Image (cartoon, helix red, strand yellow):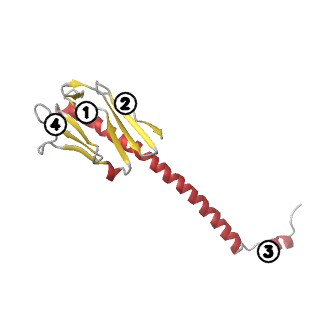
Amino acid sequence: MGFSLRQAIWLLRSNRGFTLVEAMVVVCIIGALVGFGYSGFSSLLQREKARAAATQLMGQLKEARMLAMEKHASYAVAVDADKHEYTIFRDDSNPANYVRDTYEPIIHQVDLDQDFPGVTLSVTTIPFRFDTRGMPRKSGTFMGTTFTLTLTGKTQCSFSISNVGRIDVVTCQEL
């Protein structure tokens, strides 16, 4: 059951395009879908801030531990909770004093307010350092510590350093 030539020509002439109303309805539907998608995506980005901050800090601590073993030097971690920042530096003081002197090089200095707005950091044991064997120490004793980064009301991520220097994986939970 095919079309005759006359019927095919009539169909081609009668279907010339969309009306303005049809085109506007399609544009509105696409705009609504994009709007809903963007709001979901932006909230996902917000929730991932704490995970990104924790992953960055964990990587920097692993680097400090490796440098301590490689360079046979102490690398200290100092956290200023009031300013929401942390500093990782080579602690050349003898004995190590966990305070950065002007001649001691900074490896990483991160301002959480600037790099990860809304994320706060808490640590169970601070300050501490990695000794020349990559072991975390505070006042001469081996110790472990837990880092917790929180995006207020949304996400909390944490990881720990064991008393032998093992840095565990970041775990996150929704609040």
Residue corresponding to mark 4: 91
Q: Amino acid at mark 4?
A: Asp
Residue corresponding to mark 2: 168
Residue corresponding to mark 3: 14
Label 1 and label 2: CA atoms lie apart by 13 Å
Name the mark nearer the viewer: 1 or 4: 4
Q: Nearer the viewer, residue 75 or 22?
A: 75
Label 1 and label 4: CA atoms lie apart by 13 Å
Name the mark nearer the viewer: 3 or 4: 4
Name the mark nearer the viewer: 3 or 1: 1
Q: Earlier in the sequence, mark 3 or mark 4?
A: 3
Q: Earlier in the sequence, mark 3 or mark 1?
A: 3
- Residue 98 at x, y percent in the picture: 18, 36
Q: Is residue 103 left or right of residue 55?
A: left
Which residue: 21% across, 36% down?
76
Which residue: 40% across, 42% down?
150
Res. 65 mark: 1
Q: Is residue 81 above or below residue 15?
A: above
Q: Is residue 85 above or below residue 129?
A: below
Q: Earlier in the sequence, mark 2 or mark 4?
A: 4
- Residue 89 at x, y percent in the picture: 20, 40
Label 3 and label 1: CA atoms lie apart by 75 Å
Q: Amino acid at mark 1?
A: Arg
Q: Secondary structure at mark 2?
A: loop
